[in-house]
Amino acid sequence: MKILRILVFKKSKIKSIKYTCIFLVCNLTIAQSSYLNLDVENDLYFLTDQYYSSGIFIERGKVIEKDSIKKFKIWELGQEIYTPSDTDSKDFQNYDYPFGGWTFLKYILQIEKKNNGFFEYGFQFGLTGEWSLADRVQNFYHKKIINADIPTWEAQIPKALHLNIFTSYYFQTKITPKIFMYRKFKAILGTQRIAIETNFGLNYGINVNDKISNPLCVSSGRLGIYFGLNPSFVFHDFMLSGKGFQKQKALFTNSSKTFRLIFDLGFSYKFKNWKFIYTYKNRTPDNFIQPKKQHHYNKLSVSYFFN
């Protein structure tokens, strides 16, 4: 496990990021009953840089039909970064995870059903390998923002174009006026991933896990607490196998574990049109040679709702 050597942020850079975010929010023209969300997942908070190392997602959603049955359209631009535990080494034979990036555009259509349920379907269209620009993004972040070691990105997952399609159904059960049980079942079929995923969660107060509850269906209150489990069965994972329709051959691959489990513990706070979420995640290994039985990372989310 690699420990990052320095975590130094310059005030000027923080201000630049702050003003950029304000500019984007203030200059977006979005229809009523809509939202803009930013999710950042990273294991940097635990002073590590390995496996599922980073994820950043920008999401825009809105109501497209206000009848007895509501429909919601969601677009998401995302990037996921995967690295071995030893990011300094150039000998990929010693790696325990391939370097890999996955940059995609996702479309989701959600349809409200009876009994607080939603049916959704959509697609992901994206790029892996050097085409994903994940190596450049991470190296820029390490060099310019946190003044950390620069990963080698040797033998990263091949360049390829991917398409995933998916469908899911999720619903909530009201236990008390402030306590809800959430469940979600999802199937993914594509060149980047083939999997069956489920979510089971218990939420108190305002909803925390927006991935298993529509963000526009915000319950009353300001505070929320969430505990959940996310078991999945993964039958194909390009980020480990490197097997697809691409011409480039993968130099280093891993055998993927079929069963995986993520534990979630989250907190949310809503103030006026803003919603902030912190989630701790504990993830079991994706492959058979990862030495640790669990991987810790956090997710920080901020959403702005347009009335």
Image (cartoon, helix red, strand yellow):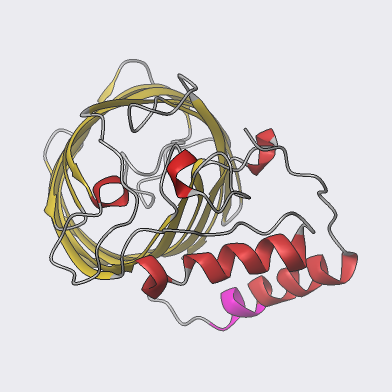
Q: Residue at x 59, y 62 (%)?
A: 138
Q: Residue at x 74, y 65 (%)?
A: 143
Quadrant in the picture for residue 242:
bottom left
Q: Nearer the viewer, residue 77 or 244?
A: 244
Quadrant of the rendering where the N terminus is positioned: top right
Image position of 98 (left or right of 47): left
Question: What segment carries the magenta color?
Answer: 23-27
Quadrant in the picture for residue 125:
bottom left
Q: Residue at x 46, y 36 (%)?
A: 208
Kindly tell me whether residue 279 is visible in this rendering: no
Pinpoint residue 262: horizontal percent, then vertical percent: 38, 27
What secondary structure predominates along the stretch shown in magenta?
A: helix
Q: Is residue 247 above or below residue 287?
A: below
Kindly tell me whether residue 260 is visible in this rendering: yes
**Residue 26: in magenta span:** yes
Q: Is residue 283 above or below residue 272?
A: above
Q: Residue at x 15, y 33 (%)?
A: 115
Pinpoint residue 291: horizontal percent, then vertical percent: 48, 23
